[in-house]
Image (spheres, grey):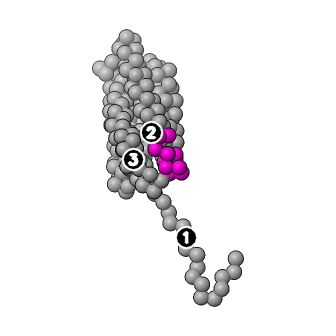
């Protein structure tokens, strides 16, 4: 479209980054921690390929697979919650999606508990060998992050019910969702590394 003389050029749309920059610094620092341990795991695996191959065969792949589905679904729940608030300012629906996210988180914890119990019954303990020590460290560390995520999503749910968010003020809600997506992403990387490839 032709512009008339003297007319200002159209400005590019402002790029939008969800959540507060401080949230991204925190999330990136958390991911850096996991990246360090991923690298350490892969290095130790490179030095002990046979040990790690046999270790993965003894894990409860069914539990890892179920928890992968649970976390992917929970990320969809929390994304729907944020979307509902940003589009319609619908607090009730957003609260329902956040409650479903919490329900999925508790289901994840239940499956993890059943997995650890199954491990003990089948002789898979933290003192078994180096592979199992790393497996327990990484999965328990991730579980702790899930529990922190439960607190974060729970806080966002309370804030939603109290009317702290609306269509134009969703920064806190986006921050909670961003942290939850990070937890999901880390597990998506952990699952094949521990349970499939070994």
Q: Where is residue 13 in the image (x, y as percent from the top left)?
A: 54, 67
Q: Name the residue that disc number 1 marks.
A: 12
The answer to whether 191 is drawn above or below residue 88 in the figure is above
Asked if the residue at tag 1 contacts the one at tag 2, i.e. Cβ–Cβ closer than 8 Å, the answer is no
Identify the secondary structure beneath mark 3.
loop
Residue at figure coordinates x 40%, y 53% from the top left = 171
Front-lying residue, 135 or 42: 135
- Magenta-span inclusion, residue 92: yes
Identify the secondary structure beneath mark 1.
loop
Q: Position of residue 136 (x, y in %)?
A: 34, 26
Q: What stretch is highlighted in magenta?
A: 83-93
Quadrant of the image occupied by residue 1: bottom right
Residue at figure coordinates x 52%, y 30% from the top left = 69
Crowding at label 2, few (<14), some or many (≥20) Cα neighbours within 10 Å?
A: many
Q: Name the residue that disc number 3 marks.
A: 163
Crowding at label 3, few (<14), some or many (≥20) Cα neighbours within 10 Å?
A: few
The answer to whether 186 is drawn above or below residue 166 in the figure is above
Q: Which mark is residue 95?
A: 2
Quadrant of the image occupied by residue 10: bottom right
Residue at figure coordinates x 40%, y 14% from the top left = 118
Q: Which residue lies furthest to the top in this view?
A: 121
Chief SS of the magenta region = helix
Q: Position of residue 24 (x, y in %)?
A: 38, 52
Front-lying residue, 101 or 190: 101
């Amino acid at each position: 479209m032709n512009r008339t003389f003297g007319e200002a050029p159209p400005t590019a749309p402002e790029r939008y980054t969800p959540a507060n920059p401080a949230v991204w610094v925190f999330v990136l620092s958390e991911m850096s921690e996991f990246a360090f341990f991923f690298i350490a795991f892969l290095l130790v695996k490179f030095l002990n390929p046979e040990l790690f191959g046999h270790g993965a065969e003894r894990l409860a792949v069914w539990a890892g697979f179920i928890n992968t589905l649970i976390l992917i679904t929970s990320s969809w729940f929390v994304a729907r919650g944020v979307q509902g608030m940003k589009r319609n300012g619908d607090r009730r629906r957003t609260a329902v999606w956040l409650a479903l996210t919490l329900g999925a988180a508790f289901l994840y914890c239940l499956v993890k508990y059943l997995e650890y119990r199954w491990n003990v019954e089948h002789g898979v303990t933290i003192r078994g060998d180096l592979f199992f020590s790393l497996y327990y460290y990484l999965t328990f560390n991730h579980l702790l992050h899930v529990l922190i995520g439960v607190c974060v999503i729970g806080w966002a749910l309370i804030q939603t019910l109290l009317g702290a968010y609306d269509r134009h003020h969703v920064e806190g809600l986006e921050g909670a969702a961003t942290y939850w997506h990070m937890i999901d992403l880390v597990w998506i990387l952990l699952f094949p590394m521990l349970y499939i490839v070994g």
